[in-house]
Amino acid sequence: FGGNCSGENPHDAHLLYTLSALQILAISNSLDDERLDKDAIAKYVSSLQNEDGSFSGDEWGEIDTRFTYIAFSCLALLGKLPLPDWNNSNSTQVVSEEKPIIDTYKAVKYIMSCRNFDGGFGCVPGAESHAGQVFTCVGALSIAQSLHLLEDADLLSWWLAERQCDSGGLNGRPEKQADVCYSWWILSALSILGRVDWINTGKLGQFILNCQDDE
């Protein structure tokens, strides 16, 4: 399908759709299909990295930490994600004879620049901490083997744990109602951080079940 995948022709290509396509192919054991042009997809992902390390979602330039997570995920699924060499202060990437397809080091540094005083992450530097962004940033750091940069992970975990409401569900931001989708983002982030036991999972499970439609 070439270097990108739009939701439905003739829509513009976007990183979101590209990752969805790759995830479906991975689940269906089809990533090795000869029709899949992995190099073209990697080139498309690479073309969306900006000078500061961030990624745009498409050619129109919207920037969001979600797109860094998506870019890392795409390249990881394709086996083409270069990893930072954090043990070598003189090197920003794993040593390779070829120029890396993206600058993962700068991308990781950009993610860290989006962290706030409360431990959470926003969609861009200075933006409000949000559960969805926290998951994408923590997930991206995990994929890039850079979770060690979260030296005070307890602060972030505390912010995540405070999202649990009286109902047992989790909200995306302070003073918001609990929501099933935010419950997923937060529980996933806590799982990556190894701190699922910081919330009452029994109450969370009951909240999820209570949201099931009786019909």
Image (cartoon, rainbow, N blue to C red):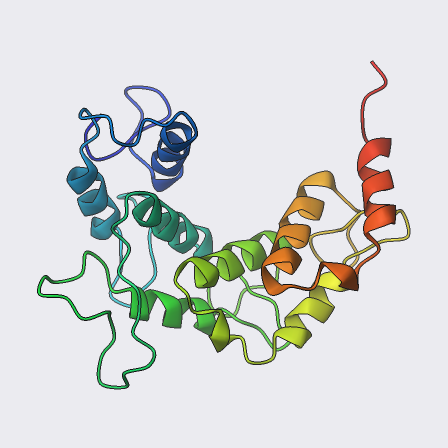
Which quadrant, please, contains the N terminus? Answer: top left
Can you name the residue that lies furthest to the left here? 97
- In the displayed structure, 135 sits above or below 106; it is above
| Quadrant in the picture for the C terminus | top right
Instruction: Work out whether residue 95 can be spotted.
Output: yes
* Spot occupied by residue 25 in the image (x, y as percentages of width and height): 36, 28
Spot the residue most to the bottom. Answer: 89
User: Can residue 63 be seen here?
Assistant: no
Q: Residue 57's x, y, as percent?
A: 35, 46
Q: Which residue is rendered at x = 55% and y = 80% of the image?
A: 151
Q: Using residue 102 as the reference point, say whether residue 21 is left or right of it.
A: right
Question: Toward the viewer: 138 or 133?
Answer: 138
Residue 209 falls in image quadrant: top right
Q: Position of residue 115 (x, y in %)?
A: 53, 71
Q: Position of residue 184 (x, y in %)?
A: 66, 45
Point out the residue furthest to the right here: 166
Residue drawn at x 68%, y 68% as measured from the top left: 157
Name the residue: 86% across, 18% down.
214
Q: Is residue 27 left or right of residue 52?
A: right
Of residues 99 and 132, which is closer to you in this image?
Answer: 99
Report the side of 202 relative to 47 (left or right). right
Quarter-of-image position of residue 210: top right
Q: How many numbered discs?
A: 0
